[in-house]
């Protein structure tokens, strides 16, 4: 009996009036009231789908009209994400150059280079370097940056 009453009350809570439906249909998302927004994208996978999603997500954020002229973006790669910057194996060079042209900071963790026995010369020459990818995330988080992991 209690279960039936509970189920009936859940049904009442989830039903929406026509006015509520209209209100939801007109929802346009959050308003970007701040003068500046900062986000760092974490890329630690060599899965092509993840790399492509990261690039797509960054472009989508940059194209969001609410954030135009207000958004600073950094892409930090480490661990498996390092492969996205390899001259010999990456198919993403032009896409990364386009992100940089749009103002995106693109950086690589040097710890990952050491762990993988790679040199900076093996990676694209247009990227920056940080001592630790995780350190970059920690510092940026404490600076108020939003962390996105595609």
Image (cartoon, rainbow, N blue to C red):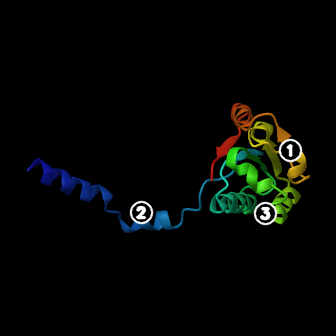
Residue at point 65%, 53% (across, down): 31
Q: Quadrant of residue 94?
A: bottom right
List x then y, in percent, for residue 93. 83, 62
Badge 3 or badge 2: first in the primary sequence: 2
Disc 2 is placed on an element classified as: helix
Residue at point 80%, 54% (across, down): 85
Q: Rate crowding at label 2 as few (under 14), some (14 to 19) or many (20 or more) other CA atoms within 10 Å.
A: few
Residue at point 86%, 51% (across, down): 122
Real-space CA distance between mark 3 and mark 2, rounded to the nearest whole angstrom: 45 Å
Q: Which residue is labeled 2 in the image?
A: 20
Q: Nearer the viewer, mark 3 or mark 2?
A: 3
Q: Quadrant of residue 107?
A: top right
Disc 3 is placed on an element classified as: loop
128 shown above or below 59: above
Real-space CA distance between mark 3 and mark 1, rounded to the nearest whole angstrom: 19 Å
Q: Which residue is labeled 1 in the image?
A: 119
Q: Rate crowding at label 1 as few (under 14), some (14 to 19) or many (20 or more) other CA atoms within 10 Å.
A: few
Residue at point 76%, 36% (across, down): 111
Q: Do the residues under discs 3 and 1 have CB atoms within 8 angstroms?
A: no
- Residues 146 and 99: in front is 99
- Residues 73 and 71: in front is 73
Q: Is residue 7 left or right of residue 61?
A: left
Q: Do the residues under discs 3 and 2 have CB atoms within 8 angstroms?
A: no
Q: Quadrant of residue 57?
A: bottom right
Q: Rate crowding at label 3 as few (under 14), some (14 to 19) or many (20 or more) other CA atoms within 10 Å.
A: some
Q: Is residue 4 left or right of residue 17?
A: left
């Amino acid at each position: 009996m209690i279960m039936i009453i509970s189920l009936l009350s859940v049904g009442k809570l989830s039903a929406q009036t026509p006015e509520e439906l209209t209100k939801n249909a007109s929802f346009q998302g959050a308003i970007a009231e701040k003068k500046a927004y900062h986000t760092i994208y974490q890329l630690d996978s060599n899965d092509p789908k993840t790399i492509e999603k990261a690039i797509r997500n960054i472009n989508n954020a940059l194209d969001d009209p609410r954030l135009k002229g207000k958004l600073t973006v950094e892409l930090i790669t480490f661990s498996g994400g390092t492969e996205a910057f390899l001259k010999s194996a990456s198919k993403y060079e032009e896409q990364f150059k386009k992100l940089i042209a749009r103002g995106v900071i693109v950086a690589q963790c040097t710890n990952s280079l050491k762990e993988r026995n790679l040199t900076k010369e093996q990676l694209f020459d247009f990227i920056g370097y940080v001592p630790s990818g995780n350190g970059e995330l920690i510092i940026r988080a404490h600076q108020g940056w939003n962390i996105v992991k595609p």
